[in-house]
Amino acid sequence: MASTDQPTSGSDRLILTIKAAYWMAALIIAAMVFAGYMLLQQRIGAHQRDETLLDLVDDQKALSQRIVFLASEARLAAPDNRLPLLASLRASTDRFDSNYSAIVAQVRLEENEAGVNADRVLNDSPHHLAHFSANLSSSSRHFLKSLGLRLEPSGVGATDNRAIENTVLDETVATATLAGYTALGNILAAHSQDMLARMLAVHRMLFAATLAVIGLVVLFIFRPVTEIIRRRTSELVDARNSMAMVAVRDGLTGLYNRAFMRDHFDTLIKASHRRQERLAVIQIDLDRFKQINDTLGHAAGDLVLVTTAERMRGSCRASDICARLGGDEFVMVMPAAGNPEDIDSLARRILTRLNEPIVYEGATIFCGASAGIAVYPVDADNVGDLLVHADLALYAAKKQGGGTFSFFSDELRRELEHRKQLERDIADAIANDGFSVYFQPQVSLVNGSITGVEALLRWHHPERGMIPPVEFLPVAEKAGEMPRIGRIVMRKAIEEAASWHRAGLQFGRLALNVSGMELREPDFTRFLFKTLEDAGLPAQKLSLEIVESVILDDEKTGIASKLRMIRAAGVHLELDDFGTGYASLSHVNPNEIDRLKIDRRFVQNINLNGDNSKIVRAITELARGLGISIIAEGAETEEELSALLSIGCEQVQGYSIAFPMPDAQTRDWLVARSPRRPVLTVVQGTMA
């Protein structure tokens, strides 16, 4: 019977041999990889230093010519324009000196480590680069000192012009410096190419050796492959978990997103129903977020959103759920909300925290936040109605001026029903072509001529009578009906203006208000020009009025090219309500805008309000200087007309000229003010 203590002779020794060979091969590969890595790192580092040195040399070549150019320009420039040129010359000289010091230090290092023979370019004939570099720098600083002293207040005068003209910088020094750096660059480039060739040779050798060793251990590759598969599987599981987290979290703020709320809101309501508890939904909106985005940029807007999210998390309870629905819209769901006093206290604490200022790059931002609150099951028993009611309460809080919160109430419920009914009536009016167009003339205060007619939307409800636009337009915009309503106005107004044009009536141009929502329609341009063509109205007789927010939103909407194409076809563009938005003066461009319309809030009582008078005067002078036409809307008294004329605003629109009129009355108004044509009559008689 064989003893169990005796080692088996075959498999154990084979396993030991395989293990030893495996680990030895692994050590050899590791040693080769490490040696190759260190050698390649050394070669790559040397090559990168050469490239950096070549960049410095190229920079010096450009700076040597820039110094001479700036000196020449500063010498010939007018006194008011010299200071920026001298500042640029000083900066270029400082950079030239800094680069030269870095080049000298690097060249010495290359000589010691790699035997680069660049010293002859620096110090030997014919280049003498060190001499010419120092000479160019000192000449530039002497030029700066000489010309800078003459720019002192006590030294400025016509008598210094000749001395300034005689202050020159020798171009031959710059030319010699350029030649020296060119020679130095050639030497360094040749050295860099040689280093690169050697690095590639070493790389090929290491690659071949590594392949040879790997070929010897191919039979032992299954174990590392198994380990890699296991590791990759673990990484995939982790990635899947991360993706699942991202799917329910907002990427910017880290709050839950709309998808999470959509999937889990019903569960929260069912849990509250089982426990017979109230659940509060607080919808939060930032009051001045768009203004911050437009004036301070998206980085400031992102900071505001992140800070708001952090403050929400810090102000709520552990059981509450905070989410970002999109943009500057947030929602907080509060299970076990308690009584109305508890909800009021929590909402007040949250808004107090959210309304605190935010500091961004030294600027203090007062964004502000408003909130609307709806409670389950008091205000609604399902997710959709809760969110709608909270949104309606939020709108009521904003109407109070913002920075506060409001609970959903029976009054808001009645408003909601009224809004829903109004939405249905708007849809019926669109289907039945129930909207009409009124026209308000625009005239010149200088000669009384008609410069334009603005088309205004009106709605005569079959039961409620005339509904003001301020009441139904916000509802139509929120319902997404503005593009359809805008096309009704466009079609009717253009057809009426075309009839005036065919009748020979003088009406200037037809002005149409166009919203950003309409301009974002993909077929807007095609519809506009087809309507003009079908009606027979020349494009030159039409102007489109856009507000400043449309220009500011162009980064996200991309309507600038569309407006340029429309203007190139002859249609005029006007900037409406100018002075009330946040558009940059860079958008007031005569190549993009034909006329500015001053908002009525600056025109009303302009004869009594000195501040408004100054604002209108500044806008008028700005427009006149740019060659842009200007018109003021809202003039209602003779005194306001006189004040506008004295300021220089020659075109007006308002009740003092004419009220908005339907098409027939507008035609009569135009006929009454059209120039009379001479009437020829045939005289009967006998021929002499």
Image (spheres, rainbow, N blue to C red):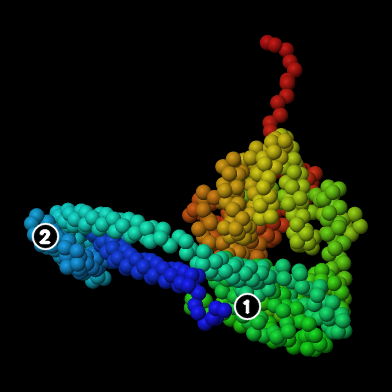
Task: Tell me which corner region of the image, top left, top right, bottom left or bottom right, holds residue 547.
Answer: bottom right
Residue closer to the observer: 41 or 678 = 41
Q: Where is residue 386 in the image (x, y as percent from the top left)?
A: 81, 73
For residue 645, above or below residue 272: above
| Amino acid type, label 1 | Thr
Position of residue 274 relative to residue 619, above or below, is below
Q: In the drawing, does residue 574 fall left or right of residue 486?
A: left
Occupied quadrant, residue 526: top right
Q: Is residue 193 left or right of residue 585?
A: left
- Specify the amino acid type for callout 2: Arg
Q: In this view, does 252 lie to the left or right of 402?
A: left
Which residue is drawn at the image coordinates 47% and 61% (left, top)? 219
Q: Residues within 10 Å of mark 1 (few under 14, many from 20)?
A: many
Q: Which residue is most to the right?
A: 463
Q: Which residue is drawn at 52% across and 82% down?
A: 5
Q: Name the quadrant of the N terminus.
A: bottom right
Which residue is drawn at the image coordinates 68% and 70% (left, top)? 248
- Residue plotted at (73% across, 82% down): 320
Does residue 685 appear anywhere in the picture? Answer: yes
Label drawn at residue 120: 2
Q: Position of residue 225 (x, y in %)?
A: 52, 64
Q: Can residue 93 be seen in this view?
A: no
How many marks can you see? 2
Q: Where is residue 541 in the image (x, y as percent from the top left)?
A: 64, 41
Q: Which of marks 1 and 2 is in front?
A: 2
Crowding at mark 2 (Cα within 10 Å: few <14, some 14-19, many 20+):
few
Name of the residue lying farthest toward the left? 125
> Which quarter of the image is occupied by the C terminus?
top right
Mark 1, residue position: 308
Which mark sits nearer the N-terminus, 1 or 2? Answer: 2
